[in-house]
Amino acid sequence: MIRANIVDANSPAIAEALKALDRYLKASQAQDVPLDTWVGPPLTFTAAARPGLEADVLEAMKMSLR
């Protein structure tokens, strides 16, 4: 979505989400459990997402990684 300019790579919320995803993936790899069966910590974001697609994408991320 960033490459296609659908969301802004400079958005604080998007940058925070990418860092959170990186931490989440690293934590799952440290557990040596398949990602589709591992239940990690809930994703929390402090940066406010822009209304619309950006907010929807971040909410979907949180819901899918519970």
Image (cartoon, grey):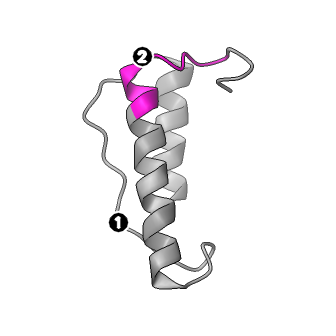
Residue 36 on image: x %, y %: 63, 73
Tell me where residue 41 sits by quadrant.
Answer: bottom left
In the rendered image, the vertical position of residue 18 relative to residue 36, given as above or below: above
Of callouts 2 and 1, the N-terminal one:
1
In the rendered image, the vertical position of residue 61 relative to residue 35, given as above or below: above
Q: Is residue 21 magenta?
A: no
Task: State the predominant SS element of the stretch in magenta.
Answer: loop
State the residue position of label 2.
50
> Which amino acid type corresponds to the residue marked 2 in the rendered image?
Arg
Outermost residue toward the right in this view: 4
State the residue position of label 1.
41
Q: How far is the residue under mark 2 from the one under mark 1? A: 24 Å
Quadrant housing the C terminus:
bottom left
Q: Could you tell me which residue is drawn at 31 percent across and 39 percent down?
A: 45
Residue 66 seen by the camera: no
Residue 48 on image: x %, y %: 31, 24
Chain part drawn in magenta? 6-15
**Mark 2–mark 1 contact, CB under 8 Å?**
no
Quadrant housing the N terminus:
top right
Secondary-structure class at tag 1 = loop
Asked if residue 24 lies left or right of residue 6, the reply is left
Asked if residue 36 lies left or right of residue 27, the reply is right
Asked if residue 48 lies left or right of residue 40, the reply is left
Residue 11 on image: x %, y %: 43, 18
Q: Could you tell me which residue is drawn at 48 percent across and 52 percent down?
A: 22
> Which amino acid type corresponds to the residue marked 1 in the rendered image?
Pro
Q: Could you tell me which residue is drawn at 48 percent across and 50 percent down?
A: 21
- 10 Å crowding of disc 1: few (<14), some (14-19), many (20+): few
- Residue closest to the eye, 41 or 28: 28
Residue 26 seen by the camera: yes
Numbered label attached to residue 6: none
